[in-house]
Image (cartoon, rainbow, N blue to C red):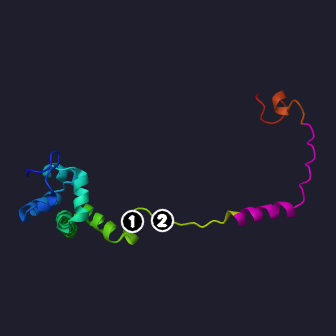
Amino acid sequence: MEKGKPGRKRKLATLTEDEYKQISAWSGDGLNESQIATLLNVNISTITREKKRNEQFAHAIKKGKYKAVQLVANKVFQNAMDGKETSAIFFLKNRDPDNWADRQEVNYNLDLKNVLTSARERIIDHAPAQALPERTQAPTVSASAKGEGEGANE
Protein backbone atom coordinates (compact mmCIF):
# COMPACT_ATOMS: atom_id res chain seq x y z
CA MET A 1 0.00 0.00 0.00
CA GLU A 2 1.24 3.47 -0.85
CA LYS A 3 2.12 5.94 1.85
CA GLY A 4 -0.30 8.81 2.18
CA LYS A 5 -2.50 10.52 4.65
CA PRO A 6 -3.13 8.48 7.80
CA GLY A 7 -6.30 6.40 7.59
CA ARG A 8 -6.56 6.62 3.82
CA LYS A 9 -6.27 3.72 1.44
CA ARG A 10 -4.50 3.97 -1.89
CA LYS A 11 -6.25 5.81 -4.67
CA LEU A 12 -7.65 3.71 -7.49
CA ALA A 13 -6.61 6.37 -10.01
CA THR A 14 -3.04 5.01 -9.82
CA LEU A 15 -3.90 1.52 -11.03
CA THR A 16 -1.66 -0.13 -13.63
CA GLU A 17 -2.85 -1.81 -16.83
CA ASP A 18 -2.29 -5.21 -15.20
CA GLU A 19 -4.47 -4.19 -12.25
CA TYR A 20 -7.25 -3.08 -14.61
CA LYS A 21 -7.02 -6.47 -16.34
CA GLN A 22 -7.21 -8.19 -12.93
CA ILE A 23 -10.31 -6.15 -11.97
CA SER A 24 -11.91 -7.09 -15.29
CA ALA A 25 -11.06 -10.77 -14.68
CA TRP A 26 -12.55 -10.66 -11.17
CA SER A 27 -15.71 -9.06 -12.52
CA GLY A 28 -15.87 -11.69 -15.27
CA ASP A 29 -15.47 -14.46 -12.71
CA GLY A 30 -18.70 -13.33 -11.04
CA LEU A 31 -17.33 -11.25 -8.19
CA ASN A 32 -19.54 -8.34 -7.24
CA GLU A 33 -18.28 -4.83 -6.59
CA SER A 34 -18.19 -5.34 -2.83
CA GLN A 35 -15.95 -8.37 -3.25
CA ILE A 36 -13.71 -6.48 -5.69
CA ALA A 37 -13.47 -3.66 -3.13
CA THR A 38 -12.28 -6.16 -0.51
CA LEU A 39 -9.64 -7.53 -2.87
CA LEU A 40 -8.46 -3.98 -3.62
CA ASN A 41 -8.48 -3.14 0.09
CA VAL A 42 -10.91 -0.23 -0.36
CA ASN A 43 -14.46 0.54 0.72
CA ILE A 44 -17.41 -0.14 -1.62
CA SER A 45 -18.11 3.62 -1.66
CA THR A 46 -14.64 4.09 -3.17
CA ILE A 47 -15.57 1.66 -5.97
CA THR A 48 -18.81 3.54 -6.64
CA ARG A 49 -17.07 6.92 -6.61
CA GLU A 50 -14.21 5.70 -8.79
CA LYS A 51 -16.60 4.29 -11.41
CA LYS A 52 -18.10 7.77 -11.77
CA ARG A 53 -14.73 9.50 -11.81
CA ASN A 54 -12.58 7.06 -13.76
CA GLU A 55 -13.94 5.82 -17.08
CA GLN A 56 -11.17 3.22 -17.43
CA PHE A 57 -12.10 1.71 -14.05
CA ALA A 58 -15.82 1.60 -14.89
CA HIS A 59 -14.96 0.06 -18.26
CA ALA A 60 -12.82 -2.66 -16.64
CA ILE A 61 -15.73 -3.75 -14.42
CA LYS A 62 -18.28 -3.62 -17.26
CA LYS A 63 -15.97 -5.45 -19.66
CA GLY A 64 -15.59 -8.34 -17.22
CA LYS A 65 -19.35 -8.59 -16.67
CA TYR A 66 -20.11 -8.45 -20.38
CA LYS A 67 -17.49 -11.04 -21.21
CA ALA A 68 -18.97 -13.45 -18.64
CA VAL A 69 -22.50 -12.88 -19.95
CA GLN A 70 -21.28 -13.47 -23.48
CA LEU A 71 -19.59 -16.75 -22.56
CA VAL A 72 -22.67 -18.05 -20.74
CA ALA A 73 -25.01 -16.91 -23.51
CA ASN A 74 -22.87 -18.68 -26.07
CA LYS A 75 -22.91 -21.86 -23.98
CA VAL A 76 -26.70 -21.72 -23.58
CA PHE A 77 -27.06 -21.18 -27.33
CA GLN A 78 -24.73 -24.08 -28.12
CA ASN A 79 -26.61 -26.35 -25.70
CA ALA A 80 -29.90 -25.33 -27.33
CA MET A 81 -28.49 -26.14 -30.77
CA ASP A 82 -27.27 -29.50 -29.44
CA GLY A 83 -30.88 -30.37 -28.56
CA LYS A 84 -30.73 -29.82 -24.82
CA GLU A 85 -34.33 -28.93 -24.14
CA THR A 86 -33.84 -26.83 -20.99
CA SER A 87 -31.30 -24.59 -22.71
CA ALA A 88 -33.55 -24.25 -25.74
CA ILE A 89 -36.52 -23.23 -23.60
CA PHE A 90 -34.41 -20.77 -21.62
CA PHE A 91 -33.00 -19.27 -24.82
CA LEU A 92 -36.42 -18.85 -26.44
CA LYS A 93 -38.06 -17.37 -23.34
CA ASN A 94 -35.34 -14.74 -23.07
CA ARG A 95 -34.85 -13.95 -26.75
CA ASP A 96 -38.52 -14.07 -27.82
CA PRO A 97 -40.63 -13.49 -24.69
CA ASP A 98 -43.68 -12.35 -26.69
CA ASN A 99 -44.08 -15.86 -28.08
CA TRP A 100 -42.46 -18.03 -25.40
CA ALA A 101 -43.42 -16.51 -22.03
CA ASP A 102 -44.84 -18.76 -19.29
CA ARG A 103 -47.53 -16.30 -18.39
CA GLN A 104 -49.64 -14.14 -20.58
CA GLU A 105 -50.26 -10.57 -19.54
CA VAL A 106 -53.82 -9.34 -19.92
CA ASN A 107 -54.67 -5.70 -19.36
CA TYR A 108 -58.20 -4.75 -18.42
CA ASN A 109 -59.60 -1.26 -18.50
CA LEU A 110 -62.68 -0.96 -16.32
CA ASP A 111 -64.54 2.32 -15.86
CA LEU A 112 -66.24 1.93 -12.49
CA LYS A 113 -68.03 5.26 -12.78
CA ASN A 114 -69.98 4.07 -15.83
CA VAL A 115 -70.69 0.67 -14.23
CA LEU A 116 -72.08 2.26 -11.07
CA THR A 117 -74.11 4.86 -13.01
CA SER A 118 -75.61 2.14 -15.20
CA ALA A 119 -76.47 -0.01 -12.19
CA ARG A 120 -78.08 2.97 -10.41
CA GLU A 121 -80.20 3.73 -13.51
CA ARG A 122 -81.42 0.12 -13.70
CA ILE A 123 -82.45 0.22 -10.06
CA ILE A 124 -84.30 3.51 -10.43
CA ASP A 125 -86.01 2.51 -13.72
CA HIS A 126 -87.59 -0.65 -12.28
CA ALA A 127 -90.59 -0.47 -9.99
CA PRO A 128 -90.17 -2.09 -6.58
CA ALA A 129 -90.95 -5.79 -6.64
CA GLN A 130 -94.39 -6.88 -5.42
CA ALA A 131 -94.44 -8.74 -2.16
CA LEU A 132 -94.86 -12.46 -2.64
CA PRO A 133 -98.15 -13.92 -1.33
CA GLU A 134 -97.83 -15.82 1.91
CA ARG A 135 -97.62 -19.55 1.54
CA THR A 136 -100.40 -21.65 2.90
CA GLN A 137 -99.30 -23.71 5.81
CA ALA A 138 -98.31 -27.25 5.02
CA PRO A 139 -99.92 -30.08 6.98
CA THR A 140 -97.99 -30.89 10.12
CA VAL A 141 -97.88 -34.63 9.52
CA SER A 142 -97.27 -36.03 6.10
CA ALA A 143 -98.86 -39.15 4.73
CA SER A 144 -95.55 -40.97 4.48
CA ALA A 145 -94.77 -40.24 8.10
CA LYS A 146 -98.03 -41.94 9.13
CA GLY A 147 -97.06 -44.96 7.06
CA GLU A 148 -99.90 -44.48 4.59
CA GLY A 149 -99.76 -44.40 0.86
CA GLU A 150 -97.54 -46.09 -1.66
CA GLY A 151 -94.08 -47.25 -0.73
CA ALA A 152 -94.84 -47.66 2.98
CA ASN A 153 -93.05 -50.49 4.72
CA GLU A 154 -95.05 -53.63 4.76
Residue 59 image position (x, y, % from top left): 19, 67
137 displayed left or right of 119: right
Of residues 90 and 81, the one drawn nearer to the viewer in this rendering: 90
Residue 83 image position (x, y, % from top left): 21, 67
Image vertical order of residue 10 relative to residue 97, above or below = above
Q: Quadrant of residue 48?
A: bottom left
Of residues 119 and 92, the one drawn nearer to the viewer in this rendering: 119
The answer to whether the residue labelled 1 contacts the one labelled 2, judged by CB atoms less than 8 Å apart, is yes
Residue 69 showing in the rendered view: no
12 displayed left or right of 138: left
Image vertical order of residue 64 relative to residue 132, above or below = below
Q: Residue at x 68, y 63 (%)?
A: 112
Q: Which residues are magenta?
A: 113-137
| Crowd rating for badge 1 (residues with CA inside 10 Å; few <14, some 14–19, many 20+) | some
Residue 77 image position (x, y, % from top left): 21, 69
Of residues 142 and 17, the one drawn nearer to the viewer in this rendering: 17
Which mark is on residue 101?
A: 1
Give the residue type that dot 1 points to: Ala
Give the residue at mark 2.
105
Residue 44 image position (x, y, % from top left): 24, 51
- Quadrant of the rendering where the C terminus is positioned: top right
Q: Quadrant of residue 147?
A: top right
Q: Residue at x 76, y 29 (%)?
A: 153
Q: Quadrant of residue 7?
A: top left
Give the residue type that dot 2 points to: Glu
133 displayed left or right of 77: right
- 132 falls in the magenta region: yes
3D distance between C-alphas at marks 1 and 2: 9 Å
Residue 60 showing in the rendered view: yes
Which mark is on residue 55?
A: none
Image vertical order of residue 121 relative to residue 43, above or below = below
